[in-house]
Amino acid sequence: KESPVDPESCAGLEVMSGHTRKIDELRGRFHAIDEFTPEKAEAEALRLRDDLAHMGEVPDYILKDLIPILCDNATWEAVVNYIDSLDGVLRDDRWVQEQRLLALSDSGDIEQSIGALEQLLKRHGKTAERCGLLGGRQTRLWRQYRDEGNQKMARKKLSSAINAYEDGMRADLNDYYPSSNLPSLLRARGRSSDIERARFIGALVVEQVERA
């Protein structure tokens, strides 16, 4: 004799099945966004964010997968606000917080960007990419102060840019982005050892490019 079917169990299975279908649809939309124009991609990224917010329970890996999509297609404010809206454990995840600081580093405020990158380096360590980003923003400040005639601050920011790029070069000798920016900055600073060091690093960069 067959056991009677529990209507509540069937209803629960249908709900779970429907939820799984929605997750699968979202993952399909995650992949499809690469085919969109920049304007449509931004709108779709924000729709994905809103759809996830109304879905109830969503696996953490799906919530994390949306972060690089927002980073690539939306504003830095959208990335920061989305991460700040996540539950505590996921929000405090090391990788998630790293993405938040990287997003803050893209803000139009150079000093805020530098602060975010310095915090990122302090928390998660030095990499060629992180140091290269910091060096780039310090370089922008150097040029700004130089053009304004503030020589004291210009010299300070120039040395900060050089230090950041040198840290990036030491972090990964195979990544020639940080080292490629050093020769011109060293020549601009012009200390007694800078010119010779600029020649040495310039030759190293050529070697790195040829080997790549």
Image (cartoon, rainbow, N blue to C red):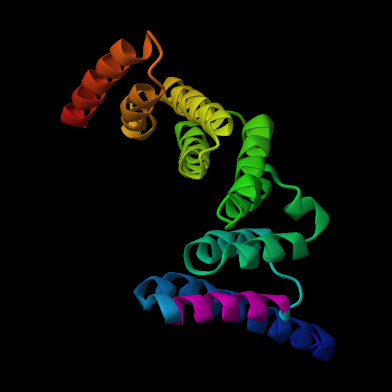
Q: Can residue 95 be seen here? A: no
Answer with left or right where residue 138 lies relative to residue 20. left
Question: Dominant secondary structure of the magenta stretch?
Answer: helix
Answer with left or right where residue 179 lies relative to residue 88. left
Residue 162 in the image, given as x and y percentages of width and height: 46, 26
Residue 124 in the image, given as x and y percentages of width and height: 64, 33
Residue 140 in the image, given as x and y percentages of width and height: 48, 44
Q: Can residue 120 be seen here? A: yes
Residue at 25% x, 25% y is 205
Q: Is residue 41 magenta?
A: yes
Residue at 51% x, 80% y is 44
Q: Is residue 167 magenta?
A: no
- Up-down: is 167 above or below 27? above
Foreground: 152 or 138? 152
The residue segment tinted magenta is 40-53
Foreground: 139 or 130? 139
Would you identify the image quadrant in which residue 174 lies?
top left
- Up-down: is 86 above or below 119? below
Residue at 32% x, 29% y is 184
